[in-house]
Image (cartoon, coloured by chain):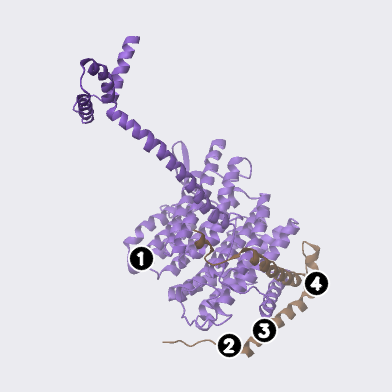
Chain colours: A purple, B brown
């Protein structure tokens, strides 16, 4: 592989972030080619680069390494390049430089995190990711997106600060900037864990995701669904594999969001909740930490990025052509959008882990790993969540958009580039489901796992199909929770209402303090001080002159004239004596005499 | 220009046929189960039709709990706008 020494080990992050700067200078077809070529080039560079560290340089007594490639980071690098390419293909028609630039910088940040060889460059790319992704939400340019973006960035700043604090303590404790397995041990590791957990959307730190992603732009949501949570999955798998806490957090994480997803009206918010649920499977796999579980986690992250991107593309296409995204406003779109409907169903089948679709070959590894470990409750929760995923992401999403009641909307298919992007993504989802071995070949550990056994296929089909039967019967009986225009409170209630309460409380308390300070210090004290500084000398002089005038028997009226003249002269500085000078002179003479 | 529309599910006959095929699949899955060689990690995995029952019960339970949850967390669409 040394035949291409120039590009070997070139940081993909710099390629993306440098490319983002160039985007506004390009036009037309060249720009489209550039946007598609960049991720393809990064993919090629990664393909040509053997495992190892590249681009190390010393900064302030610490060694920074921008590129460190091993089996684990390589898989994530591959998928981040692939999803950037597909997302760019999907976004090609929108012609909004802000979104292209931020998506590229965001992808660059994710690749930077993936290949970072030391904690400092990790932190820098982590923050680039947070900032760049915020613009994908802001670019929607609605009131809801502006406020959601502000909440989003605030949460990520807090998470980032936790990570930074953890990193500083970690470097202080170990004296090393390189990182590998850390494990939960000591304050620094807990802070790092917490920082990553925010980005991984582990409950109760998850609501930023379901709050912000549905407010993002149509292509923005595709990129958002891929990078933030999955780079957090990567870091968890790198730093905290085998942490028992993650098994339980993961299991809870698979279960809770599906209840919300069932109730939610906004289709992209349903997808956001199902994203959290899927990341829960990955967290669980990391917590189990065996070779099978880590392989399952990594392959599930790989497949998940693709089918979740596909689902967000399909929902985004519907939003793009109809301007609507609520279940209550949509329905019956299969009539005029059959291709989008088909791609959505492929995505839905993949996320539900139907045999022959990508979710099946990856999720089953995690569940099998839980079974090998005899984790009874966890296994039952994961199976419950699997059936639940099919219920909301597998059936609800396509059903309420493309079937269900006829909304009367007769929107046409989205532009061709969007269809192509969805088509290719759908193809990969099915390809990996039927022939998973190319994916298995790049996993961190050798794969000794056969997904397609009779018991497994029939078991999974029974689980899903009888879940579907329940859906069918509940819909027909009218017991299924009806679609309605409403929101559902989540843990973001705490910071959304308490923060405004905190704001109002601090406003009233601090403003009151401010007002009293002003009354005492500015109005009363300072005014008196200035008056004294202004007229003090004159007043002192007048007091000093009183006995003289009395002795000379100067009449009262003359005295008053003298006094006011004196005040005037000193106020206008006609006589160069200020109170401070007088004070200084007094002090000096006092010192002189006391000495 | 209006493209041609698919209307296959507009006809109740087609919906009925679709449901029949679906029920047929379910029945086939139930029938095939006893003939599958099973090697589950847990004893109940090998019980006949375990996954069918678990899938069905899970989804009914999911909806049951979701209905209760809705009562607790449902708010007006501009709940947060009104407060700020």
Find residue A387 and report its horizontal and vertical position in percent. 68, 68
First reached walking from the N terminus: tag 2 or tag 3? 2
Marking on residue B19: 3
- Quick check: A237 above or below A216? above
- Quick check: A590 above or below A472? above
Residues at discs 3 and 4 both on one chain: yes
Identity of the residue drawn at 70% across and 65% down: A384
In which quadrant of the rendered view does residue A344 lie? bottom right
Regarding mark 2 in the picture, which secondary structure is present there? helix
Most foreground residue, A306 or A221? A221
Verify CB contact (< 8 Å) between mark 3 and mark 1.
Answer: no
Identity of the residue drawn at 47% across and 40% down: A63
First reached walking from the N terminus: tag 2 or tag 4? 2
Describe residue A420's horizontal placement relative to residue A544 as left or right: right
- Quick check: A324 above or below A43? below
Verify CB contact (< 8 Å) between mark 4 and mark 1.
Answer: no
Describe residue A533's horizontal placement relative to residue A375 as left or right: left
Describe residue A552's horizontal placement relative to residue A291 as left or right: left
Q: Which residue is mark 4?
A: B48
Q: What's the chain of the residue with tag 4? A: B
Residues at discs 2 and 4 both on one chain: yes
Identity of the residue drawn at 30% across and 17% down: A586
First reached walking from the N terminus: tag 3 or tag 4? 3
In which quadrant of the rendered view does residue A346 lie? bottom right
Q: What's the chain of the residue with tag 2? A: B
Marking on residue A31: 1
Q: What's the chain of the residue with tag 3? A: B
């Amino acid at each position: 592989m040394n035949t291409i020494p120039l590009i070997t080990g070139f940081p993909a992050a710099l390629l993306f972030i440098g490319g983002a700067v160039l985007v506004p200078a390009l036009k037309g077809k060249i720009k489209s080619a550039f946007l598609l070529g960049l991720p393809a080039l990064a993919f090629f560079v990664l393909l040509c680069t053997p495992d190892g560290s590249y681009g190390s340089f010393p900064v302030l007594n610490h060694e920074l390494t921008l590129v460190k490639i091993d089996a684990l980071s390589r898989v994530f690098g591959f998928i981040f390049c692939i999803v950037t390419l597909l997302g760019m293909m999907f976004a090609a028609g929108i012609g909004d430089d802000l979104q292209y630039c931020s998506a590229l910088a965001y992808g660059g940040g994710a690749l930077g995190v993936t290949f970072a060889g030391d904690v400092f460059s990790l932190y820098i790319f982590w923050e680039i990711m947070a900032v760049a992704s915020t613009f994908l939400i802001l670019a929607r340019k609605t009131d809801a997106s502006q406020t959601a973006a502000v909440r989003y960035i605030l949460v990520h700043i807090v998470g980032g600060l936790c990570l930074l604090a953890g990193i500083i303590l970690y470097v202080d404790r170990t004296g090393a900037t390189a990182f590998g397995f850390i494990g939960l041990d000591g304050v620094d590791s807990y802070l790092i864990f917490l920082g990553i957990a925010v980005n991984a959307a582990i409950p109760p730190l998850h609501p930023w995701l379901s709050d912000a992603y549905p407010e993002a732009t149509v292509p923005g949501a595709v990129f958002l669904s891929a990078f933030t949570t999955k780079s957090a999955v990567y870091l968890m798998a790198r730093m905290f594999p085998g942490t028992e806490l993650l098994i339980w957090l993961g299991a809870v994480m698979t279960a809770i969001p599906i209840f919300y997803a069932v109730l939610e009206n906004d289709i992209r918010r349903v997808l956001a909740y199902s994203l959290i649920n899927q990341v829960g499977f990955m967290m669980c796999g990391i917590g189990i930490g065996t070779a099978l579980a880590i392989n399952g986690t990594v392959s599930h992250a790989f497949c998940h990025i693709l089918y979740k991107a596909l689902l967000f593309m399909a929902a985004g296409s519907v939003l793009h052509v109809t301007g609507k995204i609520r279940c209550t406003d949509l329905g019956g779109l299969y009539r005029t959008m059959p291709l989008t409907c088909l791609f959505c169903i492929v995505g839905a089948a993949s996320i539900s882990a139907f045999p022959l679709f990508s979710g099946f070959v990856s999720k089953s590894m995690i569940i099998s790993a839980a079974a090998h470990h005899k984790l009874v409750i966890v296994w039952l929760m994961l199976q419950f969540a699997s059936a639940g995923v099919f219920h909301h992401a597998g059936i609800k999403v396509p059903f309420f958009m493309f079937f269900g009641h006829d909304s009367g909307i007769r929107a046409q298919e989205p532009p061709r580039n969007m269809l192509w992007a969805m088509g290719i993504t759908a193809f990969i989802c099915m390809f990996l489901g039927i022939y998973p071995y190319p994916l298995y070949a790049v996993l961190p550990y050798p794969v000794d796992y056969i997904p397609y056994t009779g018991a497994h296929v029939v078991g999974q089909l029974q689980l899903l199909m009888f879940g579907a039967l329940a859906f069918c019967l509940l819909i027909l009986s009218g017991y299924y929770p009806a679609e309605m225009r409403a929101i559902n409170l989540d843990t973001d209630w705490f910071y959304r209402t308490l923060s405004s309460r905190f704001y109002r409380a601090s406003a009233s308390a601090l403003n009151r303090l401010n007002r009293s300070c002003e009354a005492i210090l500015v109005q009363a004290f300072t005014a008196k001080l200035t008056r004294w500084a202004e007229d003090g000398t004159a007043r002192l002089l007048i007091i000093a002159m009183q006995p003289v005038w009395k002795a000379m028997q100067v009449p009262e009226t003359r005295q008053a004239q003298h006094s006011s003249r004196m005040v005037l002269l000193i106020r206008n500085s006609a006589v160069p004596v200020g109170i401070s000078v007088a004070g200084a002179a007094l002090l000096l003479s006092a010192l002189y005499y006391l000495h | 220009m209006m493209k041609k529309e698919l209307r296959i599910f507009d006809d109740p006959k087609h919906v009925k046929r679709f449901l029949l095929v679906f029920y047929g699949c379910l029945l086939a899955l139930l029938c095939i189960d006893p003939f599958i060689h099973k090697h589950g990690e847990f004893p109940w995995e090998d019980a006949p039709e375990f996954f069918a029952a678990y899938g069905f019960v899970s989804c009914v339970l999911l909806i049951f709990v979701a209905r209760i949850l809705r009562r607790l967390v449902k708010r007006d669409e501009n709940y947060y706008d009104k407060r700020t």
